[in-house]
Amino acid sequence: MSGTDPCPVLLLTPSGRDFAVAQALLEATRIESAACADVRQLRAKLKDDVCCVIVADEALNGVDLAVLAEWVSAQPPWSDLPFVILTRRTGGADRRPMAERLTQALGNVTFIERPFHPTTFVSVVETAVRGRRRQFEARARIRELHEGEARLRTALTAGQLGSWNLDLTTSTLAASTTCKAIFGRGEHDSFTYEELRASVHPDDRARMQEAVRHSIESGCDYAIEYRNVWPNGTVHWVDIRARIVRDEQNHISQLVGVSSDITSRKTSEDQLRRINESLEVKVLERTAQLEHAHQTVLDEISQREHTEKLLRQVQKLEMIGQLTGGIAHDFNNLLMAIMANLELVRKDVPPQERVGRLVEGALRGAQRGAALTQRLLAFARQQVLKVEPVQMSALVYGMTDLLERSISSMVHLSIDTVDDVPYTMVDANQVELAILNLVVNARDALPDGGTININVDTARSSGDGELAEGDYVRVTVSDNGTGMDAATLAKATEPFFTTKEVGKGTGLGLSMIHGLARQLQGALRLESTIGKGTCASLWLPATGDKVAHAEVGEHLPDDASTDAPSMRATILVVDDDPLIATSTSYLLQDLGQVVIEANSGEAALEILRSGTRVDVLLTDFSMPRMTGVELAIAARALRPALPVILATGYAELPELAEADLPRLRKPYQQSQLLTEISKAVSPGR
């Protein structure tokens, strides 16, 4: 249960009048309540999801509170269920002991003396409920922390890393089980900071203590490799990495880090060194093999660092993509309303008049805005894709004329593909746009002319974090132009980053291609050197089916009809945004259709249950309480043959992937709306 879910208030009031008054006050404040006949029934209803318990004190007279006290004392650490005791006004001497008895048994107790003012009662109960909801929120946070700690422990264990924490004010060392094992200790063995220092090899102890001192005094990271002697006398190498932690006064208070056993690596290095020293002159070939092995180790370290850098970049782009996608979806809805109304206004105004030209200009501007949101959604990997098997060699060759028209006469275009390129599941139109974008970028990097090479081949990934293991079709666009430095290359796929002059680039080209590649389970890889040029490779998963590039593998055509439906249809339009619902209704009414509007899934289902004629259901996907997919399922349960069209700007949501529904991509124009309605009304066309 979260802090906003409903939770019941339990009432134990023997007096019927008290119960009726309390329940009426709670209902007036929309607080759910449940009555209990006696303490035993109250105990049976006590659960973690209860918000508060209201008890009249006479219901507890002569009652053994142990059954309640036992439950109260057994609450988890986050829980402190509030009890509100309704007491009678009395000056008796037994009032104080009674209060102490209840407080001791129930813990979190608030007393209200009867007769009470309704405002006082409601205020006390609402305060108790708010406090309980904060407890639920604390429970959720505690669970998140525990899950995070568990994931961290799993990661550290998988990486054979021991975690530790040294309190510099008390010299208290806290070490994980893996860390203790690295120093030859068992899980339950004592391991203090003094024991750690004593375990350091005598020849390394001064160096280790100097490294700790330098880190504390300078605030720099603590990193060292040294030998430690286990309790059984064996010597092991350990790698220590740590960072300082400051307290609220900015004083260095702790060292927090990880340790790993590098005995095997050190042993190998020591063996290599001894062999090199003894056999360097006599066994040159053996020496070369050992140097190669050493270089392999260095290459693996370098590869690991490169992979970590890629992972950080991907996470950064994912975060920016989520923000960008949210903004783009909101912008899509605004453009939907603007474009719909402009289309209708354009029909009523002669194009030659000044107003007509202004409307046409505004509509073109809105369409450019829609194109911009599609680029943003492409970067965020949320655009709707029409995926189909495509032979990439044929696609690239089919673009030759378009590509040659996009470059200047001083630039030579070369296309080269290997035989038997496998098919790949992509949106052909989006991939063509991506390739065109890469070629235009290459052209702009060749102000004085040069060469652009497009190569289509296959490659295999062993699984490097960015790409899953498997076979890929690789489209590479390279040039011998100006190139980019490392800083520019690192930012090249970030949205709105561009090196072009104002007005000559939006900074969304490469970010769009990056998002498209990720959405298709592939990747965009860039390499560049100042003065030598840039190489952009688009990796797309291969399907396994192969065909020679001489066999033209065209993607499936879009044969959707744009003719008006032959019948006057009644269309139920469902959207929680009144701007979108009204604009869509106007577009449909302009086409001669009958429109019924509903602002939620529940309202739409009521219309369907009423028996009202509905020929097509057009619903938005993203709505509160009931999504468009959930509405479609419920609607077809009522009317199995009812055509449903889903309007959305999302692409990768699991719910959408499982739904076999026609989709209308936002923002849509009247012609696109007409096409989908025609197909729904006349499915055989």
Image: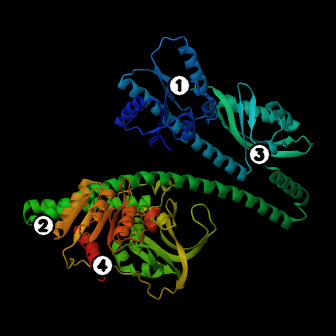
Give the residue at mark 1: 109
Q: Which mark, residue 560? A: 4
Q: Position of residue 525 (x, y in %)?
A: 52, 64
**Place of residue 614 in the rendered image (x, y in percent of width and height, measured from the top left):** 25, 69
Q: Amino acid at mark 2?
A: Lys
Local crowd size for mark 4, using a 10 Å CA cut-off: few (<14), some (14–19), many (≥20): few
Indicate the quadrant containing the C terminus: top left, top right, bottom left or bottom right: bottom left
Amino acid residing under circle 3: Thr
* Secondary structure beneath label 4: loop
| Mark closer to the chain start, 4 or 2 | 2
Up-down relation of residue 69 to residue 382 (above or below): above
Q: Earlier in the sequence, mark 1 or mark 3?
A: 1
Q: Say the numbered circle drawn on residue 178.
A: 3
**Residue 604 image-quadrant placement:** bottom left
Label 2's element?
A: helix
Q: Earlier in the sequence, mark 3 or mark 4?
A: 3
Coloring scheme used: rainbow
Helix, strand or loop for disc 3: helix
Q: Is residue 418 visible?
A: no
Question: For the residue carrying disc 2, how many other residues have a C-alpha within 10 Å: few (<14), some (14-19), or many (20+)?
Answer: few
Q: CA distance from mark 4 to mark 2?
A: 23 Å
> What residue appears at the point 28 percent right and 58 percent down from the top-left corner?
369
Q: CA distance from mark 2 to mark 3?
A: 74 Å
Q: Is residue 678 above or below residue 72?
A: below
Q: Secondary structure at mark 1?
A: strand
At label 1, the amino acid type is Val
Q: What percent of the width, then of the height, locates residue 179?
A: 77, 43
Mark 1 to mark 2: distance in Å? 71 Å
Choose mark 1 or mark 2, whichever is in front.
1
